[in-house]
Image (tube, helix red, strand yellow):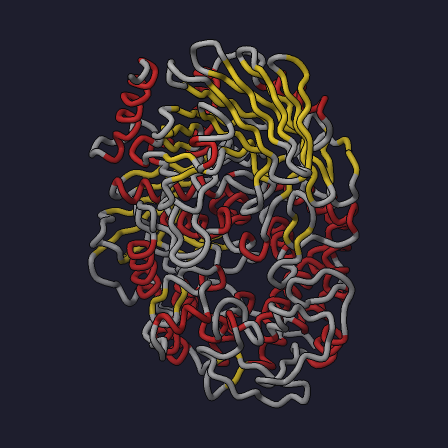
Amino acid sequence: MRTNSFRIFILLTILLAGCHSGEKPVSLVDYVDPTIGNVGHLLQPTRPTAQLPNQMIRMHPVRADYLDDQIDFFPLTISSHRQPPLFGVLPGTGNPNAGNWKNRQTYDHDLEVTKPYYYSTYLIDEDITAEFIPGAKTGFFTFTFPEENNQKLKFNLVHEGTWNIISENILIGIEEFEGMKAFVYGEFNQNAHFSLEENNQKPTLWADFTSTGPVEFKYGISFIDEEQAKRNLENEIPEWDFGGMKKRARNIWEEALGRIEVKGGTEAQKRTFYTSLYRTCERMINISEEGRYYSAYDRKVHESDRDFYVDDWVWDSYLTHHPLRMITDTKKQADMLDSYVKMYEQGGWMPQFPLLFKDNPAMHGFHSTIVFLDAWRKDIRNFDVEKAYEGMKKNATDATMLPWQNGPKTVLDEFYREHGYYPALKPGEPETVPEVHDFEKRQSVAVTLAHNYDDWALGQMAKELGYENDYLYFNREAANYRNLYQAETKLMMPKDAEGKWIDIDPKFDGGPGGRDYYDENNGYTYQWNVQHDIHGLIDLMGGREEFTQTLDQLFRESLGRPKYRFWNMFPDATGMVGQYSMGNEPSFHIPYLYNFAGEPWKTQKRIRFLLDVWFKDNIFGIPGDEDGGAMTAFVVFSAIGFYPVTPGIPVYSLGSPLFEEVKINLENGNVFSLKAKNCSEVNKYIQSARLNGEPLNRTWFTHEDLMNGAAIELEMGPKPNKKWGAEPSAAPPSKLEFTK
């Protein structure tokens, strides 16, 4: 017999699922569906994370993906995006040495409720309901058991650690990972009988409850010490008020999502949009605790009156994620850049992928340089810019550019600075440089292009700060992409150390992910990776007409082999349209390039098609690795009608908005609006535009326009107006300044 509380749970499940049964959501947060994208096309799925915006407690059931109908356990938090969880709890009944404790717990998808602020599931074999609410440094679980069985909770450790019993209703846990520690201080609403099962360095703690009624467990987590974990709990959850905490968490999300309000569009488009906006709040995370934070970058506890943020993958996030925050969360963005500066001071290098527990030298490039320039030019300057510049320049001059490697420069980096490109090996030629990663390889073309953009940003920042010699030098270095442009193929192709072209198939050669020459994508993607000098690339390709014809062909070019063969070699290049990969970050800006060559109607066509095909509001609705907000920030920008093609140049290129009206409620009190008259699924082409009531004949507007609360009006229609935005003067700026 199910309990009354479970009947209430079923009723609430039905009510909360109303947005999928034809009823319109009553608030913005009701549009969010954290299960969108929970089945990956080939690689990583999204997770139905319950979390407050940019806070460190992140909980989702540990399972393979949404198709998996069993749960390993519920983590108390995770260490970093897509990194292992910390601590775990699983409810059950009966003898710990028999029965369901030997298995993962089975759940029913239709009885699972996933919200940004609340998670609940029904463990069907055990007749147990588990519910969770996230705090900033805390969490709150409620477990409703069947009345006739024993009530048990199993607490596990993911890494080495210990459990300590403080009293009949209080426990402390410690996990040690990657040279640091996490502490949890937890309390129960009723007394428990505890028993400890030693299992090497990962002991299991059992908690048995004999009282009737739901078992509630609230806890605080700290990366400083157990006393701080206790204070985090006392500060955030002083009472046993699960419902009150749920309401507060919901209100926090409603406020965060309310930064961007949309009208019009379909209900499915709104679900995709607001779910994407929710995803962009997963990272970076604030790990400050009462004015203190533990830094893995010098292994010390620091005091600070500013929030300290970690967990960023800047290879992805510089494109969309950071630029979006520079609109919606300017103070938070400034604190994040201040955190980068602090990590440089503490660790000696400007970080690449600053995780909670270390700087992970993942991917390639020093793209935080671009983020700093972009912020500076958007008047976000509340950080030590001189110290930031010092770190940016040190990375450029002293650090190795090798993918997935931290440390000082190598002979390959010296070669790059002398010859203007990263040298590649011929197919089958053995590696001679010991620092090169065995799997990631040299990525010679990708590395060259990435550091051209980074050098451009460093040169531009030098110009902003008055360092003329640095500006002249790094601006020249930003033109190095021309050394790998092959006019016959119009592709960026590898050269050996003697300066000779290496003859490869740019669609398929280079080993897994093309990593000998490219990275995760083939030559048809990296053909366009010159965001800092798009007009220079147009000139190289023979002018606007040749450029657009080549761009057209990208979306039409065949894979040249069966799909299974292509994806066996390029599993990251998903969401394919011809040779265009919607499922990987280096492709994001490509559909907007038509704006630069006088055919913006093609951008409007492509963007609408890509959003409609690849970003559905279902479990398959993310075409590649979403990367904690990077891909979904692309969706947010594209859905509201504009995109930052060149972070570092504070302008936005117009696309084709999904909604009739967009309002961005800015922190400075202004409201930016974009109205698309007659906008619909059919009416996707811009017929004319106005900015603050005046005709807008160009395809872009400035960040200053946006922050001043500009009003843009678009007249939309079913067929393209090929004259609007066609003049060279209508194209967005992106031209390298050549210096002698």
Q: Is residue 350 left or right of residue 137?
A: right
Give residue 597's quadrant in the image. Answer: bottom left
In the picture shown, does residue 563 fall above or below 115?
below
Nearer to us in this view, 692 or 204: 204
Q: Quadrant of residue 330?
A: top right
Decide if residue 730 is in sight here. no
Q: Residue at x 38, y 14 (%)?
A: 148
Residue 644 percent location from the top left of the image: 48, 55
Residue drawn where x is 39% and y is 43% of the image: 711
Is residue 584 depicted above or below 489 in this figure? above
Residue 289 position (above or below residue 481): above
Q: Quadrant of the C terminus?
A: bottom right
Query: Where is residue 535 drawn, in percent x and y?
Result: 50, 72
User: Which residue appears at 64% of the width and 27% of the height?
Assistant: 184
Question: x, y percentage for residue 392?
Answer: 72, 57
Would you say 490 lies left or right of 404 here?
A: left
**Residue situated in front as seen by the camera: 406 or 68:** 68
Looking at the rendered image, the quarter that the N terminus falls into is: top left
Task: Give left or right: position of 368 versus 417.
Answer: left
Count of labels in the image? 0
Is residue 677 at least partly visible in the picture? yes
